[in-house]
Each structure stands twice: as structure tokens, then as C-alpha cells.
Image (cartoon, grey):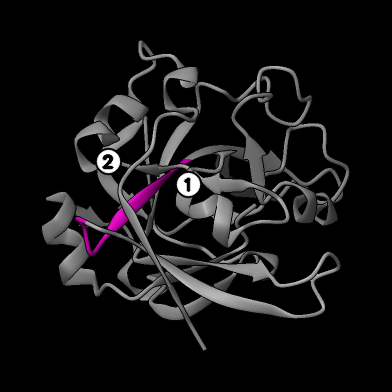
Amino acid sequence: MCYYTQQMSTIDQVKKRFHMEVDNEATFLQTDFISGFAHPNLPIILDTRPDLITTNYTWGFLPSWAKDRDFRKNTLNARIETIDEKPSFKNSTEHRCLIIATAYYEWHWHDEKGKSKQKYQINSQHDEIFTFAGLYSTWTDPANGEELNTYTMLTTQANEIMQYVHNHKMRMPIVLNKADEAAWLDHSVAVSEFAYPYESKIIALPSL
């Protein structure tokens, strides 16, 4: 799965890459190591606003029926093969977004229990700034009526590189090719088109 990313691009770099504005520059996230379990607001692009980068969504998907925010620790990722079946995601498969990043991190296990492992940083071979395929939602807190915007990152079967790196789970996030970003936001293109063997060219290097 994928729970740790990097977003080191500046506001100006992101604007130039996507040819669009950022809705709230004051909350734009730029940092080297991002944990999904902190529910950060990575910049994303929604299918409903493909002309705007928004910072108003946090990582960890909350379906409409979730009782509280704690649920989102279970929905940082969504398996693309089963999103049509899972109660958390089946009503949101057409709520698509692009999650902006510059890298992500995964660990290679040297033993069966992961007592010894090596951290890897994974980057796109072609694009300094790339996107993950994601789904988003707007959840209303039943306790106080407050609305919270959230997203999840889609994962798929690991390619050859990630089979080695992520050898205990054999999964990888769906890194989109730049030419396919608009297609992911296009509801006429089936979600299944982005499951493995769909892949983008990545490079994985040991990291401290």
C-alpha cells in the first residue's frame, strides 16, 4: 500500500506544471516526508474543477455513513480492483481526483516479519511533479454538522520494480502518466483501465 509521500514542488512550480491556480496558497503543503496517518492536505485536482488546484481536502476517505473521523485511518488507500464492491468507495467511484506529489516511499523487507527493512524513495522517471489516481468525498460530521473534504489514493498490483521494493504486500499506488491525467478525470473512461498492467515509468532508490 502507500502511506508515505513527498511533495517538494513550490506553488509556482505546481502552477506551471498544471497551468492553473491554487485556491489557497496559505495552506499549500510542501514537505519532504508526508505521513498519511497525519491526514495531510496534499494539493489535489477534482474532476468537477479540473482548472483549479485545491488544498481543502485531507488524506483518509470518509464515506457519508462514517460515524466519526477515526474511520479515515482505514481508508488512506483503495484497491482499484474492488472499489465497486467496497461499501466505503462504491458510491464514489465517479468522484475522481489527481493527487499531486514528487515522490513516495516504501520499504523492502529483508525477512518475513519485516524486522529488518530498507526504505526506498520512488520517483517518476519522466516528471519531477506527478499525480496519483484518487477518489474524494465530502463528509458531514453527525456530531456537529461540520463538513470535511477527504480523499483516498488508489492502489493496484505491483509492477516488476515494486514487486521487489514492496515485497511483503506486492502493491503500488497508481502513478498516472502525464498524458493520462485528463483521462482519469473523464468519467467516460472506465476505472479499470488504470489497473495493472497500466503503469508509468518509475525509479526506486534506497533512501535514509
Q: Which residue lies furthest to the bottom in this view?
A: 208
* Mark 2, residue position: 177
Mark nearest the camera among 1 and 2 is 1
- Please say whether residue 99 is visible from this viewpoint: yes
Rate crowding at label 1 as few (under 14), some (14 to 19) or many (20 or more) other CA atoms within 10 Å.
few
Residue at x 68% of width, y 41% of height: 139
**Badges 1 and 2: C-beta atoms under 8 Å apart?**
no
Residue at x 68% of width, y 21% of height: 90
- Please say whether residue 57 is visible from this viewpoint: no
Quadrant location of residue 9? bottom left
Q: Nearer the viewer, residue 168 or 98?
A: 168
* Mark 1, residue position: 160
The answer to whether residue 159 is above or below residue 186 is below
Horizontal side of 58 relative to 133 (left or right) equals right
Q: What element carries label 1?
A: helix
Amino acid at pointer 1: Glu
Q: Which residue lies furthest to the top in this view?
A: 188
Residue at x 26% of width, y 61% of height: 129
How many numbered marks, from 0 up?
2
Magenta-colored span: 126-133
Horizontal side of 109 relative to 181 (left or right) equals right
Q: Where is residue 179 in the image (x, y as percent from the top left)?
A: 19, 35
The answer to whether residue 110 is above or below residue 207 is above
Q: Where is residue 154 in the image (x, y as percent from the top left)?
A: 55, 40
Residue at x 55% of width, y 43% of height: 158
Amino acid at pointer 2: Asn
Q: Is mark 2 on a helix, strand or loop?
A: loop
Q: Earlier in the sequence, mark 1 or mark 2?
A: 1
Query: Is residue 127 rendered magenta in the image?
Result: yes
Q: Nearer the viewer, residue 71 or 195?
A: 195
Rate crowding at label 2 as few (under 14), some (14 to 19) or many (20 or more) other CA atoms within 10 Å.
some
